[in-house]
């Protein structure tokens, strides 16, 4: 999940995970939390901090791994 807000949208992601679990939707552990203070210039222009690239790579690696593992379940 990718979220943004004053604390990186952490609470929104936390609540969404509860809902997704009840719907039996698999999610990955890593989430990219973008801060309005550090990842947006003047609170409007998207300028992510370099650390976000590492987190996004981890998220995508987990997504590929889980989607491969769950491929047989989807059929």
Image: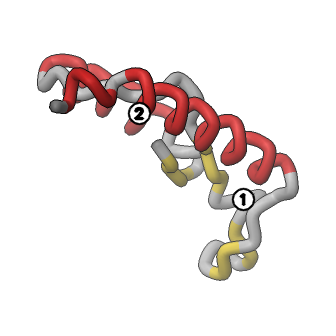
Image quarter for residue 23? top left
Q: Are marks 2 and 1 in contact (CB under 8 Å)?
A: no
Determine whether 8 is above or below 41 in the image.
Answer: above
Label 1 packing within 10 angstroms: few (<14), some (14-19), many (20+) = some
Reading the image, the residue beneath label 2 is 67
Viewer-nearest of discs 2 and 1: 2
Determine whether 36 is above or below 29 in the image.
Answer: below
Reading the image, the residue beneath label 1 is 37
Q: Nearer the viewer, residue 26 or 11?
A: 26
Task: Judge left or right: residue 44 versus residue 50.
Answer: left
Image quarter for residue 70? top left
Q: Nearer the viewer, residue 20 or 49?
A: 20
Determine whether 71 is above or below 9 in the image.
Answer: above
Disc 1, SS? loop
Q: In the image, residue 4 lies at what x, y percent?
A: 53, 53
Q: In the image, residue 66 lies at what x, y percent?
A: 46, 26
Q: In the image, residue 63 lies at what x, y percent?
A: 50, 36
What is the spatial separation of the Cα atoms under label 2 and label 1, in whole angstroms? Answer: 33 Å
Q: In the image, residue 49 lies at what x, y percent?
A: 82, 58
Q: Is residue 7 visible?
A: no
Q: Nearer the viewer, residue 42 or 26?
A: 26
Residue drawn at x 46%, y 42% as measured from the top left: 1
Residue drawn at x 59%, y 45% as measured from the top left: 8
Q: Nearer the viewer, residue 8 or 53?
A: 53
Q: Disc 2 or 1, which lies upstream in sequence?
A: 1
Q: Is residue 55 visible?
A: yes
Task: Judge left or right: residue 35 versus residue 67.
Answer: right
Q: Residue furthest right?
A: 50
Disc 2, SS? helix
Task: Specify the quadrant that holds the C terminus.
Answer: top left
Determine whether 32 is above or below 72 in the image.
Answer: below
Residue drawn at x 77%, y 52% as measured from the top left: 53
């Amino acid at each position: 999940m990718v979220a943004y807000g004053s604390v990186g949208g952490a609470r929104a992601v936390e609540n969404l995970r509860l809902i997704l679990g009840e719907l039996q939707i698999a999610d990955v552990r890593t989430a990219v939390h973008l801060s309005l203070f550090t990842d947006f210039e003047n609170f409007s222009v998207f300028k992510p901090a370099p650390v976000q690239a590492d987190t996004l790579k981890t998220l995508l690696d987990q997504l590929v791994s889980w989607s491969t593992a769950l491929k047989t379940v989807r059929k």
